Image (cartoon, coloured by chain):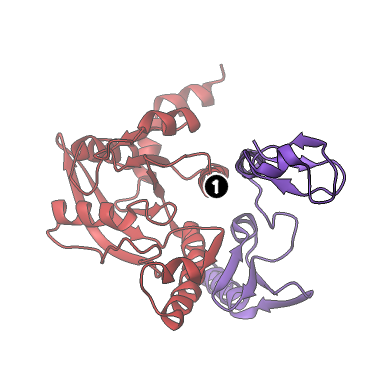
Chain colours: A purple, B red
Amino acid sequence: MPHKCTKCGRIYPDGDRRILNGCECGNNRFIYVPKEKSKDKRIKEKNKDERLNEDRTGKGVNAEGVESVRIIDPGMYEINLEKVFSREEIIIALREDGRYVIHLPSLIGKLEKKLVKRKSDKKK
Amino acid sequence: MSVIVKIKKKFSFLFKWFLKKDRMKIGIYGPPNAGKTTLANRILRDWTGDVMGSVSEVPHETRRARLREGVKIEVNGKSVMLDIVDTPGLATKIDFHEFMKFGLSEEEAKKRAKEATEGVIEAIKWLDDLDGVLMVMDATEDPYTQVNVTIVGNIEARNIPLLIVANKIDLPNASPARIKAAFPQHPVVPVSALKGMNIDTLYREIAEKFG
């Protein structure tokens, strides 16, 4: 297990001579530190828990936003499935700077479809 | 019980018969690489001798919804006429870097990501026109995902009949039981669309559910 100097915070791997001889700063007191791997594991577990919580609630990363699609960068997209399911119009967020685009064809297409349906219903 | 209710109950089968559509439009939904197009190809090959589209290990191979009309499925004397819509895989994040791992150039990968995003929107918009859904899940993967939970929840909210297909049971680490446990309110049919395993049970369930 790696050792950390209690004075300067330098970390020495297990079996390092300086743990016996003293730290470069002159201090000879050390504490055990958990391995980096265990830290990674903790982060992974935390991410897993967060993901599960998201999954159980059915909400995603963007569940709070208004946008259906967020363009993070060219070729990188985040899709808010809940919003796409629940709204007729498509709102696209451009990166993180608060600029939004409402995709009109998706909205107009729907309205036209509804109008055509209404007209055909009236004819009947 | 009032007379009207009694009459309604007695003749409900007649109402159902009159209201029944002669053709059901069924959408195949699910996350990318669950085997949606492989299943569509299997159904079409078995009943029409045709195929729906190409399949690939690179995610988001299907980026436009494809419709195949007039697929007649006959099981145990019961037949059902289906219009089958194979939809692009639904995802919450699409990153072109993922496609570059499969050897695509940056330009190709970015184009694929853009088309895949459009495909997700198109797939969801198709739900308005459907009479039933075949939800394909990869039985080797964890079913408790945001995509699966959101799709199933929204299909339930729209009252669209749903049949869950636990695909890839030919793989050693497949666990259809995990999918059954995750969505106990819906019928789950374990199959291997690629190998054709248990596919007759799926046809029977389709005829039962959508017929």
> Where does residue B73 sit, x and y in percent of width and height?
19, 47
Q: Is residue A18 visible?
A: yes
Residue found at the very far right of the displayed protein: A7
Count of all numbered marks drawn on residues in the image: 1
Q: Chain of mark 1?
A: B
User: Left or right of B32: which side holds A28?
Assistant: right
> Where does residue B211 sit, x and y in percent of width and height?
29, 41
Q: Which of the 4 image quadrants contains residue B198?
A: top left
Q: Is residue B184 visible?
A: no
User: Left or right of B129: which side holds B71?
Assistant: left
Residue sitting nearer the eye, B196 or B67: B196
> Where does residue B61 sit, x and y in percent of width and height?
35, 66
Residue sitting nearer the eye, A65 or B24: A65
> Where does residue A72 sit, x and y in percent of width and height?
65, 72
Residue found at the very far bottom of the displayed protein: B107
Q: Which of the 4 image quadrants contains residue A68?
A: bottom right
The residue at 39%/62% (across/down) is B59
The residue at 58%/79% (across/down) is A74
Tell me the crowding category of disc 1: few under 14, some 14 to 19, or many 20 or more residues within 10 angstroms, Cα based: few
Give the residue number, with chain letter if any, for mark 1.
Answer: B158
Dot 1: what SS?
loop
Residue found at the very far top of the displayed protein: B1
User: Left or right of B182: which side holds A47?
Assistant: right
